Amino acid sequence: DIAMTQSPLSLPVTPGEPASISCNSSQSLLHRNGYNYLDWYLQKPGQSPQLLISLGSNRASGVPDRFTGSGSGTDFTLRINRVEAEDVGIYYCMQALQIPVTFGPGTKVDFK
Amino acid sequence: QLQLQESGPRLVKPSETLSLTCTVSDASISSSTTSYWGWVRQPPGQRLEWIANIYYNGNTYYNPSLKSRVTISVDTSKNQFSLRLNSVTASDTAVYYCARARGLYGLDVWGQGITVTVSS
């Protein structure tokens, strides 16, 4: 199985400031088609997860442009350029290159 | 707007079968040729765990760790897809989510989740 790790696991943030989460995979997620099979999800308190970024850097429909996904191979980053109140929750990365699909442990983002 | 809704028993006894159904609204499973349909669960205090996906034509994809106990199926006439998990134990206690995916990736629509407890 492809193991997914994230850092930090807890991220206190200040509204209006940038934030960044790292995700690493035990194997490259780069497919020969040129896509990295890495998604980012946000699970807000009491809600289901929601898709933020698919295939490494493709923002999902309706996701604000303050969210950016980058990286390739085994190292990926989710950046929020100005954190807003609605961004608190747990962020998960997920690899979909290989069965079984696997998730990272999650990064809890809340305000300082 | 596409919506998913999980349904099924919230309490299952050990060794019995967990059966859940996901009803798809405002989209047709049989017409959604770019969509896959799947199940993800989240045990208390743990990370999300992918269970299985199915395509409208019946092609299935399973987590090997659960494959011997899991069946995913689709009923296009009812616009539903289902999950069966046999021989459950307390470790199967979790919130179960159904979701629409773009393959194995891009789970872009999720149900609200259903909490299932395995206990006698």
Image (cartoon, rainbow, N blue to C red):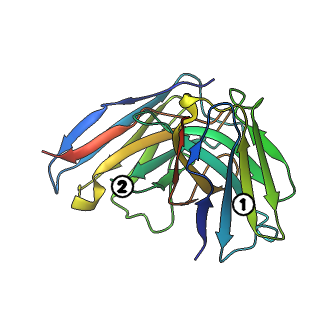
Looking at the rendered structure, whether the residues under marks 1 and 2 are on a common chain is answered as no
Circle 1: residue type: Ser
Residue picked out by circle 2: A46
x and y percentages locating residue B108 in the rendered image: 56, 59
Q: Quadrant of the N terminus of chain B?
A: bottom right
x and y percentages locating residue A48 in the rendered image: 46, 55
Q: Which residue sits at x=86%, y=53%? A: B58
Give left or right: position of B87 versus A109. right
Work out which residue is located at the far front of the displayed protein and give it: B120
Say above or below: B95 vs B79. Answer: above
Determine if residue A39 is in view: yes
x and y percentages locating residue B117 in the rendered image: 52, 41
Tell which of B103 and B19 is nearer to you. Answer: B19
Q: Which of the labelled discs sits on residue B35, or is there none? A: 1
Tell which of B6 and B100 is nearer to you. Answer: B6
Label 2 chain ID: A
Q: Quadrant of the C terminus of chain B?
A: top right
Circle 2: residue type: Gly
Q: Residues within 10 Å of mark 2 (few under 14, many from 20)?
A: few
Task: Describe the element under mark 2 as helix, strand or loop.
Answer: loop
Q: In the rendered structure, are the residues bearing label 1 and label 2 in contact, judged by CB atoms less than 8 Å apart?
A: no
Q: Which residue sits at x=24%, y=38%? A: A11
Estimate the spatial distance between the alpha carbons at disc 1 and disc 2, rounded to whole Å. 26 Å
Label 1 chain ID: B
Determine if residue B102 is in view: no
**Which quadrant would residue A108 be assigned to in this image?**
top left
Query: Nearer the observer, disc 1 or disc 2?
Result: 2
Task: Describe the element under mark 1 as helix, strand or loop.
Answer: loop
x and y percentages locating residue A32 in the rendered image: 71, 36
